[in-house]
Image: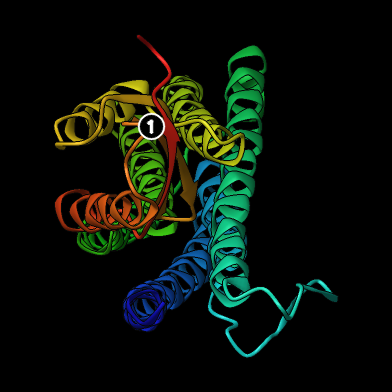
Amino acid sequence: MQEFHEHHVAEAAQWRATQASELQKLRRAQNHLWLNVAAYLAISVIEFYLAVVGHSQTLRADALNNLSGIISAALLLVGIFIARDVDDDDLLGQPLPEDSPQAGQRLQLTRFHYETVFTLITGIVMVGISFSVLFSGLKSLIHPEEQEIPRPITLVGAAVALVIMLGVWWLNRRAGRRLNNAALSAAAQDSLSDALTSLGTLVAIGGALWFQFKWLDGVASLVVGMFILTAGVKIFRESSLNLADYFDPQEEATFKQVIAQWPGVRDVAAIKAHYNGNMVTLDVIIAVDPEMRVQDSYRLGEAIEEQMRRQFGIVDTDVMAVPDVQK
């Protein structure tokens, strides 16, 4: 009993350290997203002003696209804010059982799901933006008489937007990989889409000025719109699968193979991994010798949990031992 108590204390301390590390990552991700908001706001103001001065419908559309980036970043910020709200002792007003020793951990893991929820909403926003861009491109191709040659000053707006968004994309991608943060990875794809939109705007305006080709506007819009649609669908798909409790079967097979190599494990009867935001938890059922003592099966489960944490970064592994009834 003393051994169990000591292990429980050590496991609680391990969870607090893991939680603190993840919350620190979320705080850093939040700071990056505030940088996104500032960059999108600056670009939108510059492009709107130059679009009015230079009479460019393309640049005005790009400004609206970048303005929607503020919405996407704000949604991700809300998701991270909820995930970091450790002072809230309930979930949307519904408290968890106070007598559960794992209530705090369970509540925090549930909060981490909100980051994925708002990442999914970001994908939906990107899909909506892509439809708007595609519609504008088709409309300009069908009605070329409504277009006009923009002034050269509009090239400055598109070029500034392209440079800033490439910088934001690089920072988001680097931070997303370093922090293993889905929200920043989604923001990186969003900012790359916006950078390509600005590139398409730059090419369309430049072509219109140099070659007097008004149709370049519509063609560029269609290409960029398809890219935004692809990125948005990818974000939506990955987030939906995570929320639907889907996990890569190949990774689960790797986990199963590692656990099956432990002495005393006759078979891995069942295994299921779960995403909790960016964190992974694991449920395992192992078949052991029916004569194995409870204490030995308990120690085996704890040893497996420690290996999965150390080798794969799995924050919590629940191991259930059942007797192997096969003869």
Residue 267 visible in this rendered orientation of the protein: yes
Q: Nearer the viewer, residue 264 or 124?
A: 264
Residue at left offset 43%, top offset 18%:
325
Q: Nearer the viewer, residue 81 or 17?
A: 17
Q: From what the image shows, is residue 190 above or below residue 256?
A: below
Q: From what the image shows, is residue 79 above or below residue 296?
A: below
Left or right position of 188 against 225: left
Residue 201's quadrant in the figure? top left
The residue that mark 1 highlights is: 290
Q: Quadrant of the N terminus?
A: bottom left
Residue 153's quadrant in the figure? bottom left
The percent coordinates of residue 308 (x first, y second) are 24, 50
Q: Quadrant of the C terminus?
A: top left
Residue 19 visible in this rendered orientation of the protein: no
Residue at left offset 30%, top offset 60%:
172
Q: Secondary structure at mark 1?
A: loop
The percent coordinates of residue 118 (x first, y second) are 61, 55
Residue at left offset 61%, top offset 34%:
244
For this orientation, the residue located farthest to the top is 327
For this orientation, the residue located farthest to the right is 93
Q: Nearer the viewer, residue 16 or 119?
A: 16
Left or right position of 91 against 314: right
Give amino acid for label 1. Pro
The percent coordinates of residue 38 (x first, y second) are 45, 77
By what rule are the colours in the image chosen? rainbow
- Pointer 1 local density, CA inside 10 Å: few below 14, some 14–19, many at least 20: few
Q: From what the image shows, is residue 33 above or below residue 152?
A: below
Q: Nearer the viewer, residue 101 or 235?
A: 101
Left or right position of 96 against 81: right
Left or right position of 212 against 136: left
